[in-house]
Each structure stands twice: as structure tokens, then as C-alpha cells.
Image (cartoon, helix red, strand yellow):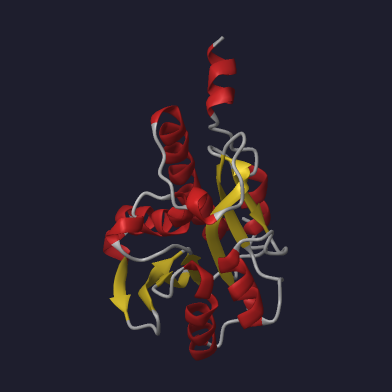
């Protein structure tokens, strides 16, 4: 079994805290962490973290920390950087999970590095870490005609879009599991073709 890239120690889901934001597009990162924790509830326990809710446990043969920043999306770096410093983690040892308006709902993408593409949470983390060289998993929240504006990312899903989103969230959990067990290259090869968009489902049923 290849162990390439199996250095991830910190999984960060980006989102906004508070009940008013539950189910909104900007909280895709929170959703993935929540589903991972629910699936592996006996393996993780809460731990202290500055500006964040966090859990620690064993997965894939190593200690893993899961984090949901409490800083709101725009200041995500204020939660990520202190924990990385206290745990002596390098950027290559983290995975940021977040929403991407440039991906349609139902798609996910894993990358080893890259810019913020206008995502304020990623901007904050890049500024705090002084690098773009860290892994990330993007969960599609965009749709035809969507625009990069605050009121859109704070809307919720419904209908076939919600169904596609829920499937993509479950697949994102599987992608995190694979990345932790086998490395980022294997995870990219297996999950970057994920497509639960409504249009793909319609085509497959015809």
C-alpha cells in the first residue's frame, strides 16, 4: 500500500458558527467535518483549541485533529494558525475543506495547493500561513447563473440541488478517509471525477 502523502494531521472544515447558518452553502466544510465525526464518533473526543471547536483521535494509523473554526469564515486563519503552531504542524499536514462557488453542486475536487479563488476563508488561511502550499478539498455550491456574492453563499439548498449536495457531502467524507489512509494522490484519482449534479443524473437516467 502506498503511503505517499499520508501526512495529514489536521482536518479543518470552514463555515460560520450559529444556528442561522446551518444548511447554508458557505457551511459545506462544517458539514463534512460533522458527518466524519458522526461516522467515527467512537474514535474522536473533544479537545481544547483557540477560536475553534476541535476533536482529536486516531485514524489511518496516526493522531488526527478535526477543527471547526468559531471565527466566522472571513477570519478562519485566526483559528488554524494557532493550532498548527501549538502542534508544530507544517502546511502539508493540514487539509482545508470548504465550499467552492466555481464548482457546481454535486462535484468535489481535491488539490495539493492553489490560490483562494476569491474565497475569503481561504484568503485568511493563506495570509495566516504565508503560503498557498497546503491540501484542500472543495465542495461545489455553485449553480448556473450563481455569482460570487455574500447573499448567495448564505442561501440554502432545495429540491434536486439538495439531493446532489447531500450525496457530495457523503462522498467528501469518503475522500477524507481515503486521503488519511492512502494519501492525497490516491484520493485525487478516486474522487476528483465525482459528479452528482442534477444534469449528470438526468443524463444517466435517459
Rendered view: 167 above or below 111 = above
Residue farthest toward the top in the current orientation of the protein: 206
Disc count in the image? Answer: 0
Question: 7 or 195, which is in the foreground?
Answer: 195
**Residue 87, how many percent across, how many down?**
50, 86
Q: In which quadrant of the rendered view does residue 30 lie?
A: bottom left
Q: Position of residue 170 (x, y in %)?
A: 43, 44
Where residue 74 sits: x, y (%)? 52, 70
Instruction: Tell me the residue at 59%/16% (across/down).
Output: 203
Residue 191 in view: no
Residue at point 57%, 71% (across, down): 94
Say which quadrant the N terminus sits in: bottom right
Report if residue 32 is visible in the image.
yes
Q: Quadrant of the C terminus?
A: top right
* Residue occupying image coordinates x 41% and y 64%: 16
Q: Which residue is pictured at 47% across the width and 34% down the height?
A: 164
Foreground of the two, 96 or 64:
96
Whether residue 154 is situated above or below residue 133 in the rendered picture: above
Q: 32 or 154, which lies in front?
A: 154
Amino acid at each position: 500500500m502506498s503511503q505517499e502523502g499520508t501526512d495529514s494531521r489536521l482536518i479543518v472544515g470552514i463555515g460560520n458558527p450559529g444556528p442561522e447558518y446551518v444548511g447554508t452553502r458557505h457551511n459545506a466544510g462544517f458539514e463534512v467535518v460533522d458527518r466524519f465525526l458522526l461516522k467515527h464518533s467512537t474514535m474522536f473526543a473533544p479537545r481544547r483549541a483557540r477560536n475553534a471547536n476541535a476533536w482529536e483521535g486516531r485514524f489511518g494509523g496516526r493522531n488526527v485533529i478535526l477543527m471547526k473554526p468559531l471565527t466566522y469564515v472571513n477570519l478562519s486563519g485566526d483559528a488554524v494558525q494557532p493550532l498548527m503552531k501549538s502542534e508544530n504542524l507544517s502546511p502539508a499536514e493540514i487539509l482545508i475543506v470548504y465550499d467552492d462557488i466555481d464548482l457546481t453542486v454535486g462535484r468535489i475536487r481535491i488539490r495539493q495547493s492553489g490560490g483562494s479563488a476569491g474565497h475569503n476563508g481561504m484568503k485568511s488561511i493563506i495570509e495566516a500561513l504565508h503560503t498557498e502550499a497546503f491540501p484542500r478539498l472543495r465542495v461545489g455550491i455553485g449553480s448556473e447563473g450563481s455569482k460570487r456574492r455574500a447573499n448567495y453563499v448564505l442561501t440554502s439548498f432545495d429540491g434536486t440541488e439538495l439531493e446532489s449536495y447531500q450525496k457530495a457531502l457523503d462522498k467528501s467524507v469518503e475522500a477524507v478517509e481515503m486521503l488519511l489512509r492512502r494519501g492525497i494522490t490516491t484520493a485525487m484519482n478516486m474522487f476528483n471525477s465525482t459528479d452528482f449534479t442534477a444534469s449528470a443524473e438526468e443524463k444517466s437516467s435517459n
